[in-house]
């Protein structure tokens, strides 16, 4: 004898107290869910590519320093510049190289920062190339 023989053939009785659930809501109960919260974001972060900071030789460093000195000497004229610098990634090793243009308005020697007219701050130690546009 099966365990359910006494109830298997009984007619279905609809509840009079509760509203019948729609098929869509019933199906949603069995839908997928994120068992590991943040797992998808972690996978995306791992897959995101970053670049290694390029090495520059002493000659390039001297060239950058000479250009920065020239900018500093002419800072009142707000010289137009184009520079490439490295932005380290906050979450993982590496970062990205960016080339921007603008007008230099200040060099903070102690903080080692170059300030542009549009308020962008570029760390001098991250500059890979800089040119004054004349």
Image (tube, rainbow, N blue to C red):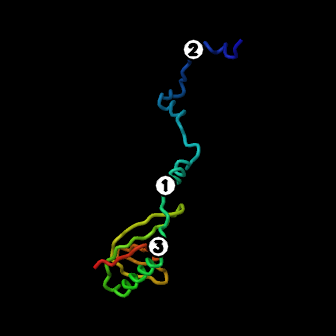
> In x, y percent, where is residue 5?
67, 13
> In x, y percent, where is residue 44?
50, 51
Element type where label 3 sits in the image: loop
Question: Against 70, is 34 above or below?
Answer: above
Contact? badges 2 and 1 (CB < 8 Å): no
In the rendered view, does 47 fall on the left or right side of 120?
right
Query: Where is mark 3, residue-wise?
Result: 56
Label 3 neighbour load within 10 Å: few <14, some 14-19, many 20+: few
Residue that appears at 43% across and 82% down:
65
In the rendered view, does 118 fall on the left or right side of 2?
left
Residue that appears at 32% across and 81% down:
79
The residue at the far left in this view is 134
Question: Against 111, is 32 above or below?
Answer: above
Element type where label 2 sits in the image: loop
In this view, the residue in front, 108 or 2, is 108
In this view, the residue in front, 98 or 35, is 98
Give the total of numbered labels. Answer: 3
Q: Earlier in the sequence, mark 1 or mark 3?
A: 1
Label 1 neighbour load within 10 Å: few <14, some 14-19, many 20+: few
Cα–Cα span, label 2 and label 1: 58 Å
Q: What number is the disc on residue 11?
A: 2
> In x, y percent, where is residue 39?
56, 48
Q: What number is the disc on residue 48?
A: 1
Q: Quadrant of the N terminus?
A: top right
Q: Nearer the viewer, mark 2 or mark 1?
A: 1
In this view, the residue in front, 51 or 124, is 51
Q: Earlier in the sequence, mark 2 or mark 3?
A: 2
Residue that appears at 55% across and 50% down:
38
Q: Nearer the viewer, mark 2 or mark 3?
A: 3
Contact? badges 2 and 3 (CB < 8 Å): no
Residue that appears at 70% across and 16% down:
3
In the rendered view, does 68 fall on the left or right side of 4?
left
């Amino acid at each position: 004898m099966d365990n359910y023989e006494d109830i298997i053939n009984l007619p279905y009785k609809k509840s009079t107290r509760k509203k019948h659930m729609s098929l869509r809501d019933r199906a949603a109960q069995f839908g997928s869910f994120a068992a590991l919260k943040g797992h998808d974001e972690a996978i995306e972060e791992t897959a995101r590519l970053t670049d290694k900071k390029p090495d520059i030789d002493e000659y390039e460093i001297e060239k950058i320093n000479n250009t920065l000195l020239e900018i500093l000497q002419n800072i009142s004229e707000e010289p137009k510049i184009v520079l490439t610098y490295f932005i380290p990634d906050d979450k993982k090793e590496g970062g990205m190289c960016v080339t921007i243009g603008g007008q230099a308005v200040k060099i903070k020697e102690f903080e080692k920062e170059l300030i542009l007219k549009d308020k962008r701050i570029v760390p001098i130690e991250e500059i890979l190339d800089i040119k004054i546009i004349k």
